[in-house]
Image (cartoon, rainbow, N blue to C red):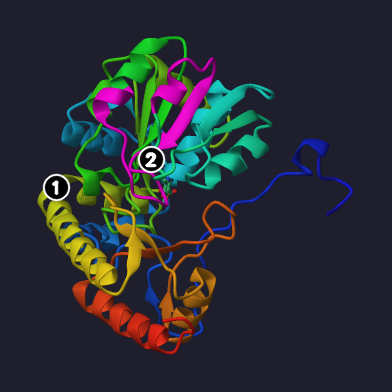
Amino acid sequence: MSIFLVDEYKDMEPYVPGEQPKDKQYIKLNANETSLPPSPNVFEAISKKQIWNMSYYADPHCHEFRKAVAEVYGVSENEVFVGNGADEVLSFVLMSFFRRGMKIYFPDITYGFYRTYAKTYGLDMEEIPVKDDFSIAINDYMDLDGDIIFANPNNPTGLTVAVSDIEALVRKKPDRMIIVDEAYVDYSGETCLPLAVKYPNLVVVRTFSKSRNMAGTHIGFAVSCKSIIDDMNKIKFSFNPFNMNSVTMAAGIAAVKDTIYMENCVSEIIKNREYFSNELKKINFHVIPSKANFVFCYNDAIDSSDLCDRLKKEGILTRHFADKLLTKYLRITIGTRQEMDVVLVAIKEILSNADGY
Ligand SMILES: *Cc1c(COP(=O)(O)O)cnc(C)c1O
């Protein structure tokens, strides 16, 4: 630490993303990316013309891209904010609407970045325990007196909250902001995005990193009422007007318009998820029923962190969290059928050598 770092940032806790080792070719199932390629339209969109365009600044209003997103999701352009990944979009939400010391509530089992943001922005975070089955009890949130953020489906459990429950929560206190992170919603099929333009206090955040197979371009967006989006743009233009580059936006426009391709990829992943979950259960795994592109599971015969290490030696990356609420479990992203079969063979092999199996 240098002598220059400001006091407020001294106890910041940077988020630790899933590792991206390059020492060899891994089957990469540790960061909920998709091993399928982006839409064929994206291959067309990144042309020589895009390279010529690099000479000039991209449109800081992201007009074409926001228009494309708005059309696909049936909202208007001024109800869409686009950013460098859902992470940056969430960061703009917190920067715009939270003062230091302000209360923020989220489940005690959820996306680890919320804790990091709370530290970064000096928020007074309160984690609400999930139920024994890891589901979120919406009634625990109804009367809370501060803003709330959660992921739906939740990460790393893959469990969902019903849209009707979210609507009840939003309606309960109109002066309280509800932020719903829908990173995995395409795999669950139940979105509250239309509610985000119906109520003045709901922000829905999406990403292209998961169901659009484009984590490397890092695109995210938020849908909310115009006044909230205007505020976020005001903050963006006071921080980094060019948060979206021209190549990324060209790719994003091509991808977002290809709904059919996305839906095909999603149904393939869902099919593989159901197959893989069933196969795991056959070999005595406890598997939380997931509505996302990953499963959260464990087997009594082997420590999950051990299993994670041994799978890595076999060239398979999965995600183990040291957090005491999560340490029993292993999160495995769903890839292609072929990848999942390789994982199953490796797991069976490891288990046959494990004590207590
Ligand atoms: C993966 C993930 C994100 C991050 O999305 P990016 O667009 O890659 O920043 C956000 N929220 C949740 C719940 C995630 O799992």
Q: Residue at x 71, y 44 (%)?
A: 12
User: From where the camera sits, is residue 347 visible?
Assistant: yes
Return the residue nearer the eye: 75 or 19: 19
At x 54%, y 60%, the residue is: 327
Helix, strand, or loop for circle 2?
A: loop
The residue under label 2 is which amino acid type?
A: Ser
Measured as percent of width and height from the top left, residue 278 is found at: 21, 66
Q: Disc 1 or disc 2, which is closer to the eye?
A: 2
Q: Nearer the viewer, residue 25 or 322?
A: 322
Quarter the N terminus occupies = bottom right
Give the structural element (helix, strand or loop) at label 1: helix
What span is colored magenta in the figure? 138-166
- Residue 154 in magenta stretch: yes
Give the residue pinned by disc 2: 135
Which kind of residue does numbered mark 1 sit on? Thr
Which quarter of the figure is the C terminus placed in?
bottom left
Position in image of residue 24 (x %, y %): 46, 85
Judged left or right of residue 191, residue 227 is right
181 or 273: nearer the viewer: 273
Q: Is mark 1 within 8 Å of ligand 1?
A: no
The residue identified by callout 1 is 259
**Residue 286's spot in the image, x, y percent?**
35, 62
Q: Is residue 95 left or right of residue 208?
A: right
